[in-house]
Image (cartoon, rainbow, N blue to C red):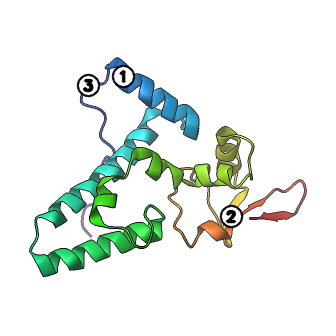
Amino acid sequence: MGDPKKCRKRWEGPHHPWRKDVLEKELIIMGKYGLRNKRELWIANSILKTIRRRAISILGLEKEQKEKEEKILINKLYRMGLLPENAVLDDVLGLTVEDILERRLQSIVFKLNLAKTPYQARQLITHGHIYIGDRKVTIPGYLVTREEESMIKCKLPIVGEVKNV
């Protein structure tokens, strides 16, 4: 029996945390998507950085290896719902943090009008009223794939009804 795996940080904070323009931009994004703290924003930023790094490394490969890796990356991002099916590598480099935040369960529940505000969407999720298929999901930051998006439903115990999308 080996040692347990070490828990690693999933985010990296800004290099200059007190720049006024960065603080204002982060505050606007936090309000728009109903984020609890800036760490949630930094996690989305880290996900975007890894996707961009992978796309940049693909640009430096040889032709046939480049086509193969590019197809794999674009298919993955299509399944995640970040890109259209006929996207190219330049579209991957054009992704923003808002594109990642739009795929969070909290944002999708709000977009599907299952909640009136992003904060209410967060509350419904954490209280266990949101299901993806038959599975209860209580993580507001869960990244919803394209195929799971149609399976989201809200089940409130007071009414006992299931509100389908």
Residue 93 visible (yes or no) = yes
Distance, label 3 to label 2, CA atoms, is 39 Å
Residue 146 or 66: which is nearer the viewer?
A: 66
Q: Quadrant of the N terminus?
A: bottom left
Amino acid type, label 3: His
Q: Residue at x 65, y 48 (%)?
A: 126
Mark found first going from the N terminus, 2 or 1? 1
Residue 26 or 13: which is nearer the viewer?
A: 26
Q: Is residue 157 left or right of residue 154?
A: right
Label number found at residue 48: none
CB-based contact (under 8 Å), mark 1 and mark 3: no
Distance, label 2 to label 1, CA atoms, is 38 Å
The residue pinned by badge 3 equals 16
Q: Is residue 43 left or right of residue 124?
A: left
Amino acid type, label 2: Tyr
Mark found first going from the N terminus, 3 or 2? 3
Residue 111, horizontal then vertical, whole percent? 66, 51
The residue pinned by badge 1 equals 21
Q: Quadrant of the C terminus?
A: bottom right
Mark found first going from the N terminus, 1 or 3? 3
Callout 1: SS: helix
